[in-house]
């Protein structure tokens, strides 16, 4: 492992606009969280001169909530971001202090690589990477509004973004494309008990009101409101860990990055986690303090899969809930109580925590709090994460209605890639849900939208057996190098080496032919029927459950289905179809959904809520055999769609 020097980092990059070497960039990224850092680094790797604007330099790469990375579904996203040369996987390997593979007893398709992180080490790694990235400049500042002008008539859209204005009144900064990764800061409000204040994270101000106004009024985007929260941080020495269940890390840490053979933290230096549970006393404190908790009474939707303890008690009364006590760093004196997100007054938080035996004498270092913030309904985005009605404007992260570092990082990388390609006059690139979890994530967002903060699960991926954590490099790195342009030649060479080695191994297995009696002698623990007495190849032996690579035959079965879906995905639906005048049998409701979302492909249309199978059949037949009707042209002047497929 090598980490660039950090001593002069803040001095080098904390510059005001008047000291910028230039006022024109290809790409401007707003926000220095997980989405913003991946977007800025990806745009620069593609070849765009990139500016990252963030409110505070020292919070770049901060783990705002939980000190962990990965998990079931989320770990797959981290592996895919790494396969596309992103930052978070390598940062996790540098900062990890407790590595584990979740769901190890199940099949590899649902394994979840996960790590507890040292907050300081993670932040230092991300900052160092950005500092050493060519074509990337970092600026400390607050964006007041977007610069918007008339659109390019040759491209779809009603507006065109041309840059940003900073809140300090300095000269505007121009750019061909802008990526907004505002996280919880867009009109953010913090809640604790009955008090609220502007902000997206404790100690930081929200994004300017001018930015929200530009999105809502100038661009006419549909804006919603979501909420999230964080638990209090507990003084480690005040907790009796002997009263909690010990959970050690894996004896051999598994790195996130395909470039790393080991993690920075040695196996013997890893820290354990501990598990405890809520008690009836916890539920009693929640119920007694509801009148003091304005956040939990708000209408904004909260995360179903990572709810506050108040939401859990109200939804599941009388039930015991898990609380994970997670270390925050190798030298940190704090614990993170995963599962105890809360927004009640600080004194009530202390009462609640002390109802748990392991924390009966616990002290709170920082109280928990809630956050409410604006998000843009993501059905207004294309699969490139570009706002459909605004040329050059891309959105990524919680502004699109997601929750979690990993979901933000994945979106950030893909938005940064496409923002750079837009600025460099290159065509947008897409990822299918058949080839990646990132594709599943983006397709779910732009096709279905969100009604609550979106979180990735393996169950969302139809082809999860093929989209495993261990083959993300084979699925994406070659494409990232050859088609996307965001992968270095070093990483590409390594992926090619792995691919060729695996191919050689598979060919060797195919040519290895042995009789079943011989196989029974060589593999005595594998049940091979005595009735069989034939010649079997090593490849055929993979069909037995206890033989390595046991999922390979199933992957072959999925291959044909994936090819069929990919053909469907490639059937383009022109963005100027007049769905209301389409001469096919579609209900008014279906026409309204198609007109509002305007899916880019037939495959995306199939996943829209409210679109019936019969409607898809009619639409498919029309795409294959009929004409499409442009909004700007009459029914008497149709254009043949076949030439566009």
Image (cartoon, rainbow, N blue to C red):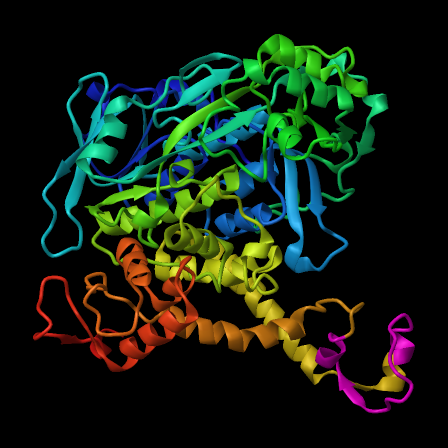
Residue 271 in the image: x percent, y percent?
74, 29
In the displayed structure, 86 sits above or below 33; it is: below
Quadrant occupied by the N terminus: top right
Asked if residue 204 is positioned above or below residue 476 in the image, the reply reads above
Kindly give the residue lying farthest to the bottom in the view shown. Answer: 534
Closest to the observer, 524 or 508: 524
Which quarter of the picture shows residue 284?
top right
The question of residue 537 being in magenta is answered with: yes
Q: Is residue 447 visible?
A: yes
x 76%, y 42%: residue: 250
In-front residue for pair 296/542: 296
The x, y position of residue 506, in whole percent, is 65, 75
The location of residue 265, given as percent across then percent down, is 68, 34
- The quadrant the C terminus occupies is bottom left
Q: Is residue 533 magenta?
A: yes
Residue 98 at x, y percent in the picture: 70, 35
**Front in this rendered view, residue 589 or 351:** 589
Looking at the rendering, the stretch of residues picked out in magenta corresponds to 520-543
Q: Residue furthest top?
A: 347
Q: Residue at x 38, y 55 (%)?
A: 447
Q: Quadrant of residue 329?
A: top right
**Depth order, front residue of 480/75:** 75
Please say whether residue 505 is visible from this viewpoint: no
């Amino acid at each position: 492992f090598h980490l660039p020097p950090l001593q002069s980092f803040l001095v080098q990059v904390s510059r005001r606009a008047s000291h910028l070497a230039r006022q024109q960039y290809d790409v401007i990224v707003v926000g220095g969280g997980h989405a913003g850092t991946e977007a800025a680094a990806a745009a620069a790797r593609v070849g765009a001169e990139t500016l990252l604007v963030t409110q505070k330099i020292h919070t770049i790469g901060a783990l705002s909530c939980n000190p962990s990375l990965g998990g079931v579904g989320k770990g797959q996203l981290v592996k895919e971001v790494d396969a596309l040369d992103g930052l978070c996987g390598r940062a996790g390997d540098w900062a990890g202090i407790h590595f584990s593979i979740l769901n190890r007893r199940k099949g590899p398709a649902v394994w979840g690589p996960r790590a507890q992180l040292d907050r300081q080490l993670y932040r230092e790694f991300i900052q160092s990477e950005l500092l050493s990235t060519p074509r990337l400049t970092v600026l400390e500042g607050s964006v007041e509004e977007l610069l918007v002008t008339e659109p390019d008539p040759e491209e779809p859209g009603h507006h065109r973004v041309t840059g940003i204005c900073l809140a300090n009144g300095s000269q505007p900064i121009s750019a061909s494309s802008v990526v907004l990764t505002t996280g919880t800061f867009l009109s953010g409000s913090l809640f604790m008990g009955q008090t609220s204040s502007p902000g997206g994270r404790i100690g930081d101000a929200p994004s300017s009101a001018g930015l929200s106004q530009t999105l809502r009024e100038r661009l006419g985007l549909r804006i919603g409101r979501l909420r999230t929260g964080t638990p209090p941080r507990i003084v480690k020495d005040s907790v009796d860990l002997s009263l909690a269940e010990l959970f050690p890390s894996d004896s051999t840490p598994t790195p996130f990055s395909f470039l790393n053979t080991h993690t920075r933290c040695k196996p013997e230096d890893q820290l354990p986690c501990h598990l405890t549970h809520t008690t009836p006393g916890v539920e009693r404190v929640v119920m007694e303090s509801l009148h003091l908790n304005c956040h939990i009474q708000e209408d904004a939707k909260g995360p179903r899969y990572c709810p506050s303890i108040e939401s859990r008690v109200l939804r599941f009364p009388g039930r015991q809930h898990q609380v994970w006590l997670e270390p925050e760093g190798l030298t940190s004196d704090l614990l993170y109580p995963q599962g105890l997100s809360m927004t009640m007054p600080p004194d009530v938080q202390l009462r609640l925590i002390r109802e748990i035996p392991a924390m009966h004498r616990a002290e709170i270092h920082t109280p928990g709090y809630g956050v409410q913030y604006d998000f843009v309904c993501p059905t207004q985005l294309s699969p490139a994460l570009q706002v459909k009605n605004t040329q050059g404007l891309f959105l990524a992260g919680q502004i699109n209605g997601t929750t979690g570092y990993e979901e933000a990082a994945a979106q950030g990388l893909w938005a940064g890639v496409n923002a750079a390609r837009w600025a460099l006059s290159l065509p947008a690139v897409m990822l299918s849900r058949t080839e990646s979890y990132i594709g599943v994530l983006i397709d779910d967002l732009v096709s279905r939208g969100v009604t609550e903060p979106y979180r990735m699960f393996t169950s969302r991926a139809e082809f999860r057996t093929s989209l495993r954590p261990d083959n993300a490099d084979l699925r994406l790195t070659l494409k990232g190098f050859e088609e996307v342009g965001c992968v270095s030649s070093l990483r590409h060479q390594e992926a090619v080496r792995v691919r060729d080695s695996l191919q050689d191994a598979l060919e060797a297995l195919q040519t290895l032919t042995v009789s079943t009696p011989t196989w029974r002698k060589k593999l005595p623990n594998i049940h091979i029927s005595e009735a069989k007495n034939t010649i079997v190849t090593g490849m055929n032996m993979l069909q037995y459950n206890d033989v390595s690579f046991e999922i390979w035959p199933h992957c072959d079965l999925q291959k044909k289905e994936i090819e069929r879906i990919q053909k469907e995905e490639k059937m383009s639906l022109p963005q100027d179809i007049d769905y209301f005048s389409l001469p096919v049998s579609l209900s008014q409701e279906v026409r309204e959904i198609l007109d509002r979302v305007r899916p880019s492909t037939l495959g995306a249309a199939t996943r829209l809520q409210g679109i019936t199978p019969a409607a898809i059949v009619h639409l498919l037949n029309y795409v294959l055999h009929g004409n499409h009707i442009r909004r700007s042209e009459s029914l008497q002047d149709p254009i043949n769609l076949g030439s566009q497929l």
